[in-house]
Image (cartoon, rainbow, N blue to C red):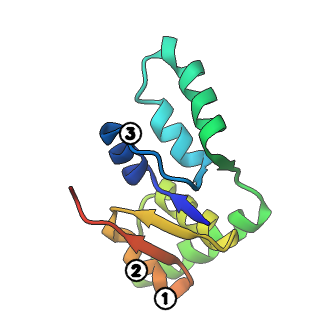
């Protein structure tokens, strides 16, 4: 199964394309914060019907800390949101589908990545 990153989900929504997979709770938050308040409830329901929404659990937290430490030692930190999404993919043994090249540096940490080009 695939974990669909925010960048790909936004692109799919704009193009009217549905792609089966899961999303992180972080992706849900990133999507909902850009939607007018009066439409958020309905949008949240649609996301929950369309995708398995993966929460942040103990495995994700520990993987996040491992990734953070590794990147910090290399001086290559990425955003906390992206680290949590990557940790969710690794902890759940999913392929992360993203347009964000920052995730490339996490492949050596066990991230399975399907990197999509800008369209």
Identify the disc placed on residue 108: 1
Q: x, y (%) of residue 117?
A: 25, 65
Q: Earlier in the sequence, mark 3 or mark 1?
A: 3
Asked if residue 51 lies left or right of residue 112, the reply is right
Tell me what residue is drawn at x 35 percent, y 69 percent.
Answer: 102
Q: Earlier in the sequence, mark 2 or mark 3?
A: 3
Identify the disc placed on residue 34: none
- Report the residue marked by disc 2: 105
Tell me what residue is drawn at x 32 percent, y 70 percent.
Answer: 101
- Report the residue marked by disc 3: 13
Tell me what residue is drawn at x 45 percent, y 64 percent.
Answer: 97
Circle 3 SS class: helix
Q: Vertical placement of 73 versus 87: above or below?
A: below
In front: 74, or 101?
Answer: 101
Splitting the image into 4 quarters, where does residue 28 fall?
top right
Numbered disc in front, either 3 or 1: 3
CA separation in Å, label 1 and label 2: 7 Å
Q: Vertical placement of 63 versus 33: above or below?
A: below
Answer yes or no: do the residues labelled 1 and 2 have beta carbons within 8 Å?
Answer: yes
Q: x, y (%) of residue 25?
A: 62, 46
CA separation in Å, label 2 and label 3: 27 Å
Answer yes or no: do the residues labelled 3 and 1 have beta carbons within 8 Å?
Answer: no
């Amino acid at each position: 199964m695939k974990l669909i990153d925010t960048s790909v989900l936004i692109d799919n929504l704009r193009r009217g394309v549905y792609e089966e997979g899961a999303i992180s709770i972080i992706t849900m938050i990133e999507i909902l914060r850009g939607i007018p308040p009066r439409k958020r409830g309905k949008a949240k329901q649609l996301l929950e019907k369309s995708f398995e929404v993966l929460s942040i659990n103990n495995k994700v937290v520990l993987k996040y800390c491992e990734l953070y430490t590794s990147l910090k030692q290399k001086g290559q930190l990425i955003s906390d949101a992206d680290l949590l999404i990557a940790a969710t993919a690794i902890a759940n043994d999913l392929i992360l589908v993203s347009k964000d090249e920052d995730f490339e540096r996490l492949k050596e940490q066990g991230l399975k990545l399907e990197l999509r080009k800008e369209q």
